[in-house]
Amino acid sequence: MKLFMFRISILLALISLFSFSSSGSPRFDTVSDTLKDTMKETVKATVVFVSPFAAANDRCFKCHGQDKYTYTNETIGREIKDIMCSERIIRKKEFYSSNHKSFGCTDCHSEEYTKFPHAGTLRMEQKYICLDCHGGDAKFAKYHFEEIDSEYRKSTHFKMENDGFSCWKCHNPHTYKISVRNATNLKETIEYDNSICLNCHSDYSRFQLLSDKAEIDLIKEHDWLPNQASHFANVRCIECHTKINNNIPVSHQIRPKAEAVRLCNECHSQNSILMASLYKFESKVQRRDGFFNGIILNASYVIGANRNEYLNLISLGIFLVVLIIIGVHIVFRIRNKSKTIKEK
Ligand code: HEC
Ligand code: HEC
Ligand code: HEC
Ligand code: HEC
Ligand code: HEC
Ligand code: HEC
Ligand code: HEC
């Protein structure tokens, strides 16, 4: 009976030890964070933005807001239904949750577009660039537009400017919204940011507008990376493909492929580059439960970057105890041996 009670208490001690260690584990935090996010999202969803240009914009959304549009053919005096090509569809909901939601369509496009058919010359319309509005504006200083612009000019895509590449190719004028800066759900942000790149890099119809290169098979290009799916869900393309710049939160200098990060320990180590990029905004709030780069734990567990100093100490302790036990054991063996020799 005594032995039984002893075993039970050992078991209980083990269980409480495990539940103690799991309370500091990543999974627990992820669950409660997701819950928090869902609650925040629900609250946000009930506050809907109302644009001062809502009525004026509806003149455009009538045709550009969905797959189908209608117009009256004056010559034959009949209503015609047609399909809006997908590149020219702007979803109302996405537009009104984007950075530029407070604009009217004709702030950036000619007023002439209210007429249909649109005049052919409108296609030659000069478009604004980001710096036209954001350059030298103190209100947007925290975004460092000028520095981003100069990084972009050094990036590998810039050579395609004459073929039509511009900031707008990554920052869709009608849907782009800042996300990593306000990230409450990092996984979603990673997906959002990666979808910006995949827009071209997994859609050859867009890619070929800018380059004569044959289609690049991204899966094959990255087959040196184990658990590709898991990596692509947990890091952004730009983590490996940009040069880190500590002045701006999102580096914009995309380097040629030969200079991309390939070494595992750039991330899987204590001075992980992820702390200077993906986790930059969060790294200001460090956790105090003994994990190195603990902030990463809110979203992922990164082997090598997330070693726990307490666990390190515990394992050192266990190692010492084992050494002591072996030492004691040896001492007793020697004493017993000399005893038996003496008895003989
Ligand atoms: C009656 C439907 C209709 C309305 C209303 C309409 N558009 Fe269009 N728009 C089109 C179609 C169809 C195209 C595809 C190209 C074409 O046929 O000219 C287009 C193309 C465009 C383009 C692409 C450039 C081009 O000339 O091909 C822009 C920009 C544009 N529309 C902006 C607007 C804006 C801004 C408004 C609102 C002020 C608007 N459109 C209202 C049907 C419409
Ligand atoms: C902040 C400025 C801005 C606002 C606001 C804006 N657009 Fe645009 N729009 C642009 C730019 C810039 C382009 C060209 C994008 C590119 O080069 O990839 C464009 C392109 C387009 C195109 C052509 C897409 C294509 O790929 O052919 C259509 C259609 C269009 N806009 C309609 C609209 C409508 C409708 C609205 C209002 C709901 C609107 N835009 C609001 C800046 C704006
Ligand atoms: C026609 C002028 C204009 C152009 C062109 C323009 N922006 Fe803006 N942008 C604004 C204004 C004005 C706001 C503030 C909107 C508001 O507060 O509702 C804004 C907001 C933003 C914000 C969010 C700022 C915040 O604090 O919420 C970002 C990020 C941004 N723009 C990025 C860009 C990028 C990137 C480009 C080019 C691809 C661009 N903008 C082009 C005028 C412009
Ligand atoms: C190759 C794609 C690409 C190009 C080209 C690009 N950007 Fe970005 N940019 C991104 C990505 C990805 C992000 C991160 C978006 C997020 O999650 O907020 C970003 C973020 C930003 C932000 C927000 C940074 C912050 O502090 O939150 C600004 C401002 C910006 N870009 C401006 C520009 C300007 C200006 C240009 C052109 C000179 C440009 N971008 C060209 C991909 C691009
Ligand atoms: C509008 C389309 C488009 C978008 C968006 C885009 N790219 Fe590209 N990218 C291209 C094209 C086209 C090429 C091929 C250029 C050439 O001909 O060498 C390219 C080339 C590259 C290369 C190879 C460069 C070299 O010199 O070896 C890398 C790396 C790259 N892109 C990464 C990215 C990343 C990361 C993003 C997202 C932040 C992104 N791209 C977004 C179109 C795009
Ligand atoms: C873990 C780091 C890492 C991540 C994450 C990553 N890449 Fe790469 N990528 C590389 C390396 C390294 C190469 C060079 C491979 C080679 O030289 O064979 C490369 C090659 C490329 C190329 C060049 C292909 C060519 O032949 O020109 C493109 C384009 C590219 N990546 C796009 C992306 C996109 C888009 C994403 C996000 C979905 C991404 N990468 C995510 C490390 C990464
Ligand atoms: C750009 C940063 C980065 C680079 C470079 C990188 N990793 Fe990772 N790796 C991560 C992150 C973040 C995770 C966390 C995934 C998670 O939370 O499940 C991860 C997870 C892993 C996992 C666990 C996979 C899983 O499904 O949980 C293995 C194994 C791994 N990496 C091996 C490697 C190897 C081998 C290399 C080099 C060839 C490498 N990684 C390069 C960021 C990186």
Image: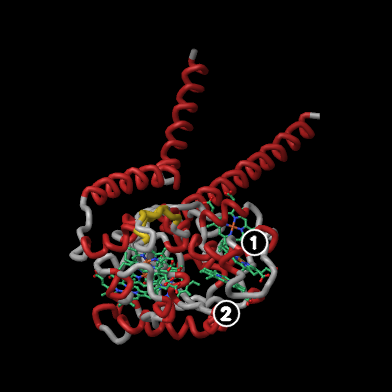
Image color mode: secondary structure
> Can residue 13 be seen in the rendering of this structure?
yes
Provide residue 311's location: percent of width, then percent of height: 50, 50
CA separation in Å, label 2 and label 1: 17 Å
Provide residue 273's location: percent of width, then percent of height: 51, 68
- Front residue of 272 and 148: 148
Q: How many marks?
A: 2
- Name the residue that disc number 1 marks: 218
Q: Residue at x 30, y 87 (%)?
A: 136
Amino acid type indicated by mark 1: Leu
- Front residue of 10 and 244: 244
Q: Earlier in the sequence, mark 2 or mark 1?
A: 2
- Neighbourhood count class around disc 1 (C-alpha, 10 Å): few under 14, some 14–19, many 20 upward: few
Provide residue 19's location: percent of width, then percent of height: 43, 36
Callout 2: CB less than 8 Å from ligand 5: yes
Classify mark 2: helix, strand or loop: helix
> Can residue 292 be seen in the rendering of this structure?
no
Horizontal side, residue 53 vs residue 136: left or right: left
- Name the residue that disc number 2 marks: 156
Horizontal side, residue 57 vs residue 195: left or right: left
